[in-house]
Image (tube, rainbow, N blue to C red):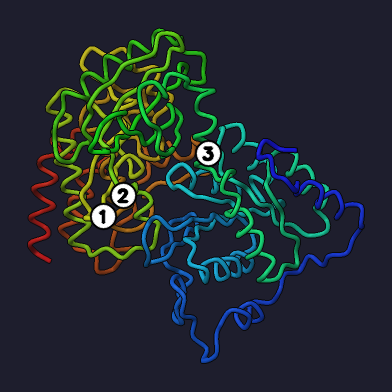
Amino acid sequence: MTWWEVSESPCDRADAALDAGPKMDYVCMQTEHIEQAMVPCGGQTTRQGMTGDHDDADVESGKRTHGSTRGDINRKSILVVDDDDKIRRILRQILAYDAYNVLECANGREALETLERASVDLVLTDIRMPELDGISLLTELRRLTHSIPVVVISGETSVKAIVQCMKIGAVDFVSKPFTVQAVKDVVASVFRRRFKSPRELQISHIAAFHPWLKSKFTLVDRIGEGGMGVIYCVQLPGDPSGRRYALKVFKAQDGRGAPAQALRERFLREAKAAASVSHPSIVRIFGYGFERDVMDCYILMEFIAGRSLADLIYSGTHLALSSKIEMLARIADGLEAIHAAGILHRDIKPANVLVDDDHNVKITDFGVARLPDSDLTKVTEIIGSPSYMAPERFDSGSPDPRSDIFSLGVLGFELFLGLRPFTGETIFELSDNIRKIPHPHPQDIDDVFPDALTKVLDGMLAKRPEQRYARAAEISADLRAAAQTL
């Protein structure tokens, strides 16, 4: 029995399938059969999330992620992980027909990267995949304490692996070849188990991890989790307004043996400085502190009803170029305020920018920020986000505001063009590309990309710090000037 405590254990079904012997053909149903089963009379789908002209290439992010271009952001999201393009397409059609938001990855490594920037309610994964298979993915999710339910999909040759997945913590499985109804039934069954949903399960276990929370806050939801801690949506007990806040609880250790006392002192010092920065494009901080008995640091912040910029970029939502320009200009405005306070953010990336329903932006996550005279360098060098780091950070150079400006350039490139300018199979290849290889010319990706915006991106992504913009305020001014020429 897994910690999900299902009354009818899927492990029993998996064991039964193993005892029954080889009965399944690995080949999935043909795509046209799926479509015939789903399309009503007249040949047009009518439910939200599917249209007759659905395009498989909604947004190419390099991670094969797709999403509905309509519907609200509160609909349940499902991550489909399979190295077979055809099976992913079939599953997307089945799930999108029932109005789920669907994201896709081709292997476990891509899935873990996607889960860093996107919030999902269910993972549907194959077992046999290159780079990182389904068992390794499930094991890593459980190691990271993710409470996202995982359903495995596999053919006859992987029945033993299914049993292993169930024992690790998968909540159910679907056998190949699968039918439309089989997929629908399993997904619906997972979401019907209300007492076992990821958010409720996480809330029910919080007292074991942070017992002091209940005495200070009313817990509403778990928002997300990262390397430095967990973020919850909370309310203040007795507050008649019912206002919601984001509460970030930092871990006592960074996972690499850093002394808890040193991390706590650094966090409190930097939280105080971050709270001193006030700007419309920066998440407001209301308070911070730590619990001596359990050594938990926490910070109480403004709650933003929306999603991360990373989610928005890869959701398939269409944004006008003028809207993207203004969003980037506002992020630059916020970064200018941070630098004016003598702070280096050092982790500017789409996942650390929140976007509300009106496309207002808020920079968040000062967890790796560096202040004047701060001694946090060693920790932040470890936990930064390599894809967004400036070249000098890989060469152990001293970062300055222009390092954040390079990171903003990577973010802007991704926002405008839908992919990162630098990639690599390993950290060493990635760092070499960032330090030595010029970023792609925007017009090689979009032949009508404006020259004025190309110039702004070039000014942020220059390899040498002295060749970049000196101040973020110059970037926002040039962006707004470029918008006037469109």
| 282 displayed left or right of 14 | left
Camera-nearest label, 1 or 3: 1
| 7 displayed left or right of 39 | right
Q: Position of residue 431 (x, y in %)?
A: 43, 36
Depth order, front residue of 457/100: 100
**Hey, which residue is sitting farthest bottom in the picture?**
42
Under tag 1, what secondary structure?
Answer: loop
> Residue 120: which disc?
none
Residue to which mark 2 is pinned: 306
Write down the quadrant of residue 182 in the picture. bottom right
Residue to which mark 1 is pinned: 357
Residue at (55%, 85%) from the top-left corner? 40
Counting the numbered discs, the total is: 3
Depth order, front residue of 110/94: 94
Q: Position of residue 64 (x, y in %)?
A: 50, 59
Camera-nearest label, 2 or 3: 2
Q: Amino acid at mark 2?
A: Gly
Residue at (52%, 68%) from the top-left corner? 98
- Crowd tier of the residue under label 3, counting other residues whose Cα lies within 10 Å: few below 14, some 14–19, many 20 or above: few
Q: Position of residue 389 (x, y in %)?
A: 35, 35
Location of residue 226 with respect to 441 vertically, above or below: above
Q: Amino acid at mark 1?
A: Asp
**Is label 1 in contact with label 3 (beta carbons under 8 Å)?**
no
Residue to which mark 3 is pinned: 426
N-terminal of the two: label 1 or label 2?
A: 2
Label 1, label 3: how far apart the Cα atoms are:
36 Å
**Is label 1 in contact with label 2 (beta carbons under 8 Å)?**
yes
Q: Amino acid at mark 3?
A: Thr
Under tag 2, what secondary structure?
Answer: strand
Location of residue 241 with respect to 379 vertically, above or below: below
